[in-house]
Structure formats: structure tokens, C-alpha cells
Image (cartoon, grey):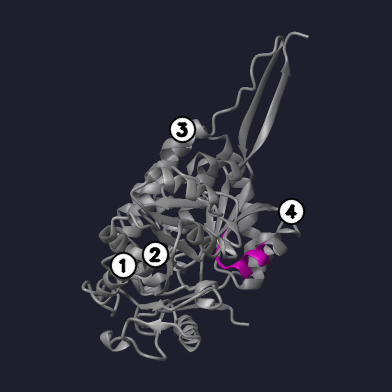
Amino acid sequence: MTDTLRTISPVDGRIYVERPLQTAAEIDSALDAARHAQIAWASVPLAARCAVLAKAVDAFVANTAGIAAEISWQMGRPISHSPGEVRGFEERARHMLGIAESALVALDPGEKAGFRRRIKRVPLGVVAVVAPWNYPYLTAVNAVLPALIAGNAVVLKHSHQTPLCAERFLQAFDAAGVPTGVFSYLHLSHAETARLMGDRRVASVCFTGSVSGGHAVVAATAAGFATSGLELGGKDPAYVRADANLAHAVETLTDGAFFNAGQSCCGIKRIYVAASRYDDFIGGVVDLTRRYRLGSPLDPQTSLGPVVRTAAANAIRAQVHDAVSRGASQLIEESAFPASAPGTPYLAPQILVGVDHSMPIMREETFGPAVGIMRVSSDEEAVRLMNDSEFGLTAAIFSADAARAESLADALDTGTVFLNRCDYLDPALAWTGVKNSGRGCTLSRVGFESLTRPKSYHFRLNP
């Protein structure tokens, strides 16, 4: 087993980062430091914790240019898009800082003569955050900042594809004066990550990744009884009703399918279109897709970068080819994207029609720039097909009728339902999934609940 982390850049296939993997002894030392630092950190008043964490956000944002370039090199997002992740990081971090006082206020169950009663939200202790590469800061900040705000210590294990992100977090916290041990990171093998999650000093694990990874987290945390929040996969659908603003739906859903090369848990992977709008919708999406420019993410003119690695590209190609072998049709000519080439992580975006739910392309997660589109005859058919999935992260409806859209949303088995938008996390709303999309919640006031525990104070006065 290798004792070195090596990040292969999808830009050109070279090793971009090398780091030693931490040992069992180093994990032990980090957890001891985190446990001791957490006790002191939790005693710091909430307002003071928020003040120092706000300085950390300032320090992070000040490095936007360097951070954006590292994102592009590590996972392949176009350099014109990468700064947007820093903006999203800041939006979420500042929102959670802004609502902390009201979200963590003690609950008063009501007056009772001779007693004072309260329910406080107190920190869990040490929180382990296991973060992925596709949105390396946006996924991590959802747990890292709220956990620290609430008085926990955090140990971050980031993806081997994006290890510099963990280091950038620590730089910002150090610059702001966050006490040593309150935040730390570890570069770990799979086996040592399981060891970390099963350690009894870890109170909770926040994991974003695959369904199989989620099962591994549950198995690992059983050893130490840590709680776990799991944000897993998605096969997110959209429905374009007959009354939709078609131009808006075309633009929004094309972006929702292909932004970040389709590598988003809540990206659009399947679209259902009212029969009366189907042909016009297809024509609009095909036209807009052909305008993408596939190429090096370091080129400011690139609008579609490579997927994260060649193996991922091959898996997407195989899923598309399987659909075609079952009768689907590809609407995008790969020749229109000269940078697309077998044996590389560069592949053309693809639109598939003639698809149905017997095909994996409409049922299994597609983590790349490919989307299937089906014609539907009614709202009821659309809802049935949207719910016909093992996943339930988000769903999007495009319609001019908000009341009807809400009734359809009530019938959808997902964590979030959008109207006339998609592929976006509002930090004021709970981010959660159902079925194989995971469990637990981040962001919003509700997100603090999984990073704290209730503690009751039952005081008899003047006995």
C-alpha cells in the first residue's frame, strides 16, 4: 500500500500534488489535540467564536485567485468558473455566521412555578468531515463552518483529488487566530479514514460522496457510536410543463446538466417535457449545447472542462453507448468538440432521446455531461417518472403556475424542489436528501441541529 497521496491533474495528466499519508500515530495525536482544544473552544462565547471565524472567511476570500487556479488544476473546472466556488463559500459561511445566535438560542418550554427550565444546544465534541472533490469547498463548508460555530472541533479529511483544499482551510483559520487543534486536516488512506470514523473520540461524521461510501461510513461509525450525516448521490429530474417559459427552461436546464462537466450531485440528469413543448425544447437545448467550448480549463474561453479522470470519462461513455445500443439516439456529434478523445478525461456533452426507464442512463447516477430527455403526456406521468428512482436529492419544475407546481412538489419524494431554477443551494434552506441520496441535514437553522445535541436544564428554585 502506498504511503503517498498523488493528485493526477485532469488538465494534462501530470502529478500536481504529492503528500505523505498520515499514520495511525498521527491520527491519534490529531484526535487528542482536537479533543483538548474543543473543550476550551466551546467555552469561548458564541459571539467571539463567530468573530474569529468571520476573520477566517475574510482571509480565505483574500486568496480567491490562487484558490481558483488550484481548483482548476486539481479537478478540471474551467478557470472562468472556479472563482464562483469561492463566492459560494463566502455566501454560505456568512449566512451561517449570521444566523448562529438565533439558531443556537436556548429553548424555553414555558413557565412553571418554582422552576427554571431550558433546553440548550451544546456541541457534540470532535466532528470528522470527509469531503469530495467535485465542489471541494462548497461541500466542506456546509459542515466545517457550522460545526466550528457551534463549538465543536473539526478534523477534515479531503479527497485525494483536492488535498490542497484542506490546507487552504487551515491557512485561513491560522491567519484568523483560531486556536491550534480546533481545526486540523489529515491526508488518509481508505483504511485510516475508517479508523478515524470509528474512533470513540469522534462524535460525528459528516460525509459527502457515493452511496457505497455512505455504507462504509455507517459500518465504520458503528465501532465508536458516532452519528453521521450523509450526502450521497443523485439522479435529479426536471419537468417542463406546457405553460413553462421555454427559453428560460432551455437555458437553465442546459446549464444545470453541463455546468462543472455535469459533476454535481444535484445537477440535472433526466428531463421530462410536456408533449406540446417537447420538439421546441429539444431544439433549444441542442442549439445551446453546441455552443459550449470543450478544452483546457486553464483557457479563459473554455466553458466545459474535462471530467475528473479518464476512468470517469470511460464510465460515462459506456453508459451513453449502452443507451444507444438499447435504442436511444445521440443528438450531439462528438466531432463538433475536437478536444473530445477516447482515453482522455475530455468528452463531449451529450443529449439522449428515445430513452426510457429500462436504461441505466435514466436510473443510475451519471456523474458527467450527459442527460436523457423524455416526452410526457401529463403531470401525473411526470411525477411518477420523477419518483421512479433510488435517489431523492432535488427535483425541478418549470411552470408559470406556482400553485400547481407546489401541489406537484408535495408529491415528489426529494429533499428539495425547485420552481424555475435548479442546481443551487440556498444556505437559508435545509440541504437534505431521501432514499439513496442520504440522511441528515446541513445549512439553514436546521443544519445546526445535527452538529449539536440538546441538553436539558431542570432547576428547582428555593426548595
Residue displayed at 49% across by 31% down: 102
Q: In the image shown, does 54 or 424 lie closer to the viewer?
A: 424
Q: Earlier in the sequence, mark 1 or mark 4?
A: 4
User: Which quadrant would residue 387 be assigned to in this image?
Assistant: bottom right
Amino acid tagged 3: Ala
Q: Which residue is identified by label 3?
A: 47
- Residue placed furthest toward the right: 463
Disc 4 or 2, which lies upstream in sequence? 4
Select label 2 or label 3 by which is in front.
2
Which comes sooner in the sequence, label 3 or label 1? Answer: 3
Please tell me whether mark 2 sits on a helix, a strand or a loop: strand
Tag in front: 4 or 2: 2
Question: Marks 3 and 1: which is nearer the front?
Answer: 1
Q: Position of residue 126 (x, y in %)?
A: 62, 50
- Identify the mark nearer the N-term, 2 or 3: 3
Q: Which mark is residue 281?
A: 1
Cβ–Cβ below 8 Å for labels 3 and 4? no
Residue at the far bottom in the pictured view: 342
Question: Which residue is identified by label 2?
Answer: 273
